[in-house]
Image: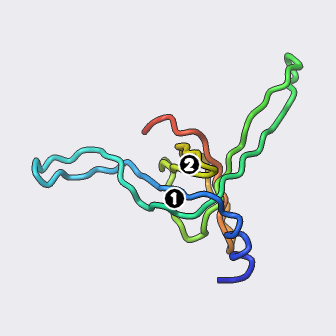
């Protein structure tokens, strides 16, 4: 592992669990049902939350929004629609993947949104 990647991973303060909604066959009933499946557990990561303030042209009122970004190892594959449960600073929050990752040799960055349920 290169020194840049080690330096970035020292900043990881959280862990995440990656979950997908998949078809799973019940061995007893032989029925297939949709269920939440853990793909990866306790993966080191870091959340970065940026608050963006903007003034609208119509009403001149300031609006505030947040951009939540997940920093994680570049080899971790996270599919669109995946639930990502992040625990950082003693708080656990469920997110979903809301964009294509920016993948670098040292890490990847994924913009997240709050999880609102399986689509």
Label 2, secondary structure: give it: strand
Please identify the quarter of the rendering in which residue 40 is found: bottom left
Q: Position of residue 33 (x, y in %)?
A: 24, 44
Q: Position of residue 26 (x, y in %)?
A: 17, 51
As drawn, is 42 to the left or to the right of 64?
Answer: left
Q: Position of residue 50 (x, y in %)?
A: 76, 45
When the figure is inspected, residue 3 is found, relative to residue 12, above or below; the finding is below
Judging by the rendered image, the residue that carries numbered circle 2 is 97
Q: Residues within 10 Å of mark 2 (few under 14, many from 20)?
A: many
Q: Relative to the observer, which residue lies in front, 18 or 41?
A: 41
The quadrant in which the C terminus is found is top left
What residue is at 67 percent from the left and 69 percent from the top? 9
Q: Which mark is residue 78?
A: 1
Sequence-earlier tag: 1 or 2: 1
Please identify the quarter of the rendering in which residue 102 is found: bottom right
As drawn, is 10 to the left or to the right of 91?
Answer: right
As drawn, is 22 to the left or to the right of 70?
Answer: left
Number of numbered labels in the structure image? 2
What residue is at 71 percent from the left and 43 percent from the top? 67
Q: Relative to the observer, which residue lies in front, 46 or 96?
A: 46
Q: Are marks 1 and 2 in contact (CB under 8 Å)?
A: yes
What residue is at 74 percent from the left and 77 percent from the top? 4
As drawn, is 31 to the left or to the right of 39?
Answer: left
Q: Position of residue 29 (x, y in %)?
A: 10, 47
What residue is at 55 percent from the left and 58 percent from the top? 15
């Amino acid at each position: 592992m290169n020194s840049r990647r080690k330096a970035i991973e020292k900043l990881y303060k959280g862990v995440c669990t990656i979950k997908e909604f998949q078809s799973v066959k019940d061995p007893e009933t032989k029925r297939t049902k949709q269920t939440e499946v853990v793909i990866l557990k306790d993966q080191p990561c870091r959340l970065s939350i940026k608050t963006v303030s903007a003034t609208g042209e119509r009403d001149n009122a300031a609006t505030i929004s947040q951009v939540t970004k997940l920093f994680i190892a570049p080899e971790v594959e996270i599919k669109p629609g995946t639930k990502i449960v992040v625990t950082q600073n003693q708080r656990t929050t469920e997110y979903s993947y809301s964009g294509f990752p920016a993948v670098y040799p040292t890490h990847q960055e994924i913009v997240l949104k709050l999880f609102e349920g399986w689509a």
